[in-house]
Image (cartoon, rainbow, N blue to C red):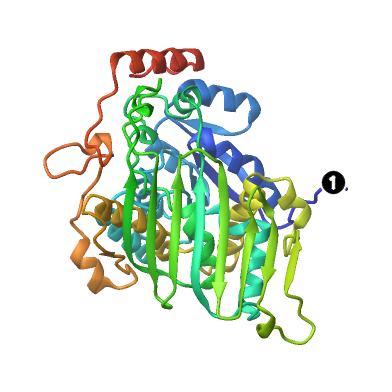
Amino acid sequence: MAARKIKSKPIRVGVVGLWRGLGFAQGAQYCGMELVALCDTWEVKLREAQQRHADVAVYTDYDKFLEHDMDAVVLANYFHQHAPFAIKALNAGMHVMSETMACKTLGEGVALARAVEKSKKIYHFAENYCFMAAVQEMRRLYHNDEIGAAQFADCSYNHPCDSKTMSLLAPGLNHWRNWIPSTYYPTHALGPIMYITDARPVSVNAHSIARPEQDLEQAHVRRNDPGSTILCRMDNGAMTHVFGLMLRGHDTWYRLHGTRGVMETMRGAPSELRVWREPWDLREGEVSNKIYTPNFPVHHELAQQAGHGGGDFFTNYFFAEAIRSGEQPYLNVYRGLDMSIVGIQAWKSCLDEGRPYEIPDFRSEAVRVKYENENWSPFAEDRGPGQPPPSIRGNIEPTSKQKAAARKVWKEMGYEGE
């Protein structure tokens, strides 16, 4: 049976960043959104996109793009550059959906929270892993008291790849993927745990895993560490262990221990869910161990066709629903900032022998004032005195051999930058 679109007055939307952004653009039509504009500085990719979307306006200048007649902007630009783009769009009177990292510094996080409040526009943090079918089912089970109160969660997002793929994903010596510290992408792991339990992190301890000597010889130009382990104290008293990012063994996994049971996605089969309880915790009609594949709670057919386990459909869906209702979505700016700030504060902990760092709550203006001028950043464009390195080994400089191998890949893919 063909999937049916959600019927409503179209929400005119523009998308920034065509690498990841076209995935959002292609799914927007099923959620009552109409793609009207595209923006990217990579002109080759922009021309290719225009061939597929002939009726859509294209821009290389973001300010000109914001002058287009539209209701909302989807930000799929570089991972760490979303906050300034979001603030501009909000100030221009547009709703914003932003993925990956809400802010790269705490100062940006303060500015973003203030901009959302001042604009009164919708801000949706597009953490798509929250909306996989098994994760949505875990949220339902948790709020039905199937496993009791959360005590400990274990979660991972680990995505290794070979050197050529690394270069394909990160064209340019200063591409964000070549500089991102190992803690800076916690949202795919931590986000679902926050979504399931409604808890927020209040402090973190973290350690980074240094690249081994043999990995330093690989034919890519990344300067960062392959992985980290982060321990979050949550505001409900529970602990959450977050693991990733590029160690061997592709894995997306969530386990939650409650006061009367456990539930987890199945390793190697993240769409399957296991729930089990000790014999003395069983209630009438319950079984001690159950493994099953849940459906999506709504729009199952549409979600099945979308990427990232169906999560890509629901990021668009909940964004559109929030715009129509005028109410901020569950993954609002504050939860987006909570998830993102974990990565920043965890990196401070890694460089400080695992010392705990607080996760400031930017719902409070009194808290925001303390951090409004903080610009601590490990990314290439921010290098300078007082700024942190992207690895616990310090500032790793790629060899001429590694640069030559990466540039060969970039040339093949049509990237002409440095």
Where is 328 relative to 159, above or below?
below
Residue 290 is situated, as x and y percent measured from the top left of the image, at: 75, 67
User: What is the three-letter code of the residue carrying label 1?
Assistant: Ala
Which residue reaches farthest right?
1
- Is 225 left, or right, of 13 in this rendering? left
Q: Nearer the viewer, residue 329 or 93?
A: 329
Residue 132 is situated, as x and y percent measured from the top left of the image, at: 64, 56
Q: Which image quadrant is residue 393 in?
A: top left
- Is 150 left, or right, of 209 in this rendering? right
- Is 118 left, or right, of 42 in this rendering? left
Read off the residue under disc 1: 2
Where is 280 relative to 329, above or below?
below
Which residue reaches farthest front?
279
Residue 243 is situated, as x and y percent measured from the top left of the image, at: 45, 52
How many discs mark residues in the rendered view? 1
Does the image show residue 96?
no
The residue sitting at 50% across, 53% down in the picture is 156
Q: What element does badge 1 sit on?
A: loop
The residue sitting at 50% across, 17% down in the picture is 413
The residue sitting at 23% across, 49% down in the picture is 351
Specify the quadrant that holds the C terminus.
Answer: top left
Does the image show residue 286?
yes
Residue 198 is situated, as x and y percent measured from the top left of the image, at: 50, 72
- Is 85 left, or right, of 293 in this rendering? left
Q: Nearer the viewer, residue 312 or 89?
A: 312
Q: Nearer the viewer, residue 97 or 304?
A: 304
Which residue reaches farthest left?
385
Q: Which image quadrant is residue 64 in?
A: top left
For mark 1, does the 10 Å Cα neighbourhood hold few (<14), some (14 to 19), or many (20 or more) residues? few
The residue sitting at 43% across, 55% down in the picture is 93
